[in-house]
Image (cartoon, coloured by chain):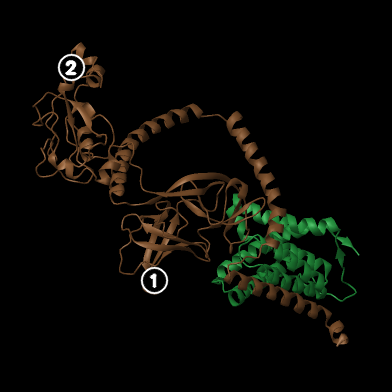
Chain colours: A green, B brown
Amino acid sequence: MPITYTSKEQIEVYRFSLPVTIAVPLIAIFFQAFVPLRFPFFAIFDLPLLVVIFFAVARRSPVAGLITGSLIGIVQDSLTHTPIGLFGIAKGVVGYGASSLGVKLDVENAGSRFLVTVFFYVVHEFIYFMVARGLVGLSLHWSWPHELRSAIANAILAVALFSLLDRFKRRT
Amino acid sequence: MENIISRYRNVSVLVAVLFAQVLLLGVQVKRSEENRSTRLIRVWTVDLITPFEKAIVGVQSGTVNLWHEYFYLRGVRQENRELKQQIERMQLEQVRLNNDAEQSRRLQALMGFKEQFISHTVAAQVIGSSGSERSRVIYIDKVANDGVGKDMPVITSDGVVGKVLNVFHSSSQVLLIDDQTSGVGTILEQSRLQGVLEGTPSGEIILDKIMNDEQVQPGEKVLTSGGDGIFPKGLLIGTVEAAVHGPESFLSIKVKPAADLGRLEEVLVITQKEERAPDVAGTNSRAVDILAQRLPSVPDKPPAATGGGDKKDQTSVTSPTDAPPSGRAAATSTVSKKPGTTGLTPGVSNPAASNSGKNPASERSLPEETAPDSYSVVKPATGTFPAPNQKKVSPPGKPPAVQPQPQTAPAAQQDQPQ
């Protein structure tokens, strides 16, 4: 099983340079907004969410994960016409959860990354769904097949994307 | 207290951040109920992202244009031939459509019907999207300086796309018709049933508010009704894909959009609409004129005969309802004819004319023109019948009793001033 319990002594915490911290989320949001115009199927992916999970797991700091997720989510909200904060809340919780999980589990290999992404994608969608319906009153409907397909597609992309982003990691 | 917070620092921050965002959501929901928007963060983000999108789209379209217009010209001649043939076919079709349109305009004018015309559009390039399936909006590269404003309709040559939702400094946000918050007033082309077009969370488009007992056939075209005050009437939206009985008393009609909303590259923003009665000036508004046009052709009169015939050979035929009051220049159709051939006495006007000289309708619609092909006709005012005592020249449905003008006119007559 790729996910293994690790003691605090075994945990490696990474950090990223400031340009990477700023540029990677912005590029992810840019691609998310631009690519579906030419390739509509790309809308199934959520690149900003994958970036949130990657930074959160690598930094292993719940507060940093929360803030990173919230900021990325708010910027993503700004490009929609729905109220700002829906993605912010969902990605903030995911960032917090992924960091907390990263503290306890080794999520450095492809298998664990796949499973973690599937799990947090569903969590993200669920939180978004609840907040959008409960607080804002949007009429969304939940479709398990669609969510699971999207989760798997995002997890496959995450494995490739995370290995690419691993190059920007710096050991503390 | 401090110990508790420091002990549960992470959870405290989580709660604080989430609470702040929930508060932010609450403020926005409240403001949206008051029709006030929260723009600041959106403006920053859009101004940050869209210039890059604009640049990429510009480079991409430049490269594509260079390739298509200078390098890749295979098959252009064949395509050109096909297009020419297509133009010929369309010209024939256009003649028929023009006739129908003119007839329609005349009828609308008679009814005092006003409709909206698209008087100005701005072409825009699509540069981005929201990137979310739950918010179906796109961004275009035209802004307020280009004449784009909120709630302006956005279309393509295929059909309706959506409406402008927000205008920013470097781009404008367009809400697509398949978004679940979108609503368009529609009418079905054949059955003339009116409904409201709405998007669904899954991205489908449904037509709502049509009763279950109505008959709607798949394939029927869905047009804008103009009832929403945003889209002009008659724009194509799509076709009915399926119609089934809904859970309530309304049909559930699935509509396939005419425009490919997933692959938009260029769109048109309707920046100006004009509401006016159909323009019938320039067309012959009188039924008899139309009738005269449809008569078998008669050889054209020489210009001299038309312009300078003997006054004795000219009959000043006054419309029964168009006779002007005394002192006012008579607007008459002056046509040449042989005296006595039509039953009209030269210079005799209809007695009824004096009673109807102040008819505003006739004053408005009187063109000062020469009747086509030298026919001697009495011109009744549009939409009115001749008075009973009027000398009937051209009974409805029959060619008027006419005499072609002599082909040659004496030289003396040609020199007569008109």
Look at label 2 and name its amino acid: Gln
Asked if residue B202 lies left or right of residue A98, the reply is: left
Residue at the limit of the structure toward the top, as seen here: B411
Mark 1 packing: few (<14 Cα in 10 Å), some, or many (20+)?
Answer: some
SS of the residue under disc 1: loop
Look at label 1 and name its amino acid: Gly
Residue that carries the numbered disc 1 in the rendered image: B246
Q: Are marks 2 and 1 on the same chain?
A: yes
- Can residue B326 be seen here? The reply is yes
SS of the residue under disc 2: loop
Residue B407, which numbered label?
A: 2
Image coords of residue B275 (percent x, y): 42, 50
Give the quarter of the image for residue B229.
Answer: bottom left
How far apart are the two marked residues, 2 and 1, measured between alpha carbons? 72 Å
Asked if residue A8 lies left or right of residue B57, the reply is: right
Residue B255, which numbered label?
A: none
Judge whether B369 appears above or below A143 on screen.
above
Q: Where does the N terminus of chain A fall, quadrant-wise?
A: bottom right
Mark 2 packing: few (<14 Cα in 10 Å), some, or many (20+)?
Answer: few
Q: How many marks?
A: 2
Q: Chain of mark 1?
A: B
Judge whether B280 appears above or below B70 on screen.
below
Upstream in sequence: badge 2 or badge 1: 1
Asked if residue B299 lies left or right of residue A171, the reply is: left
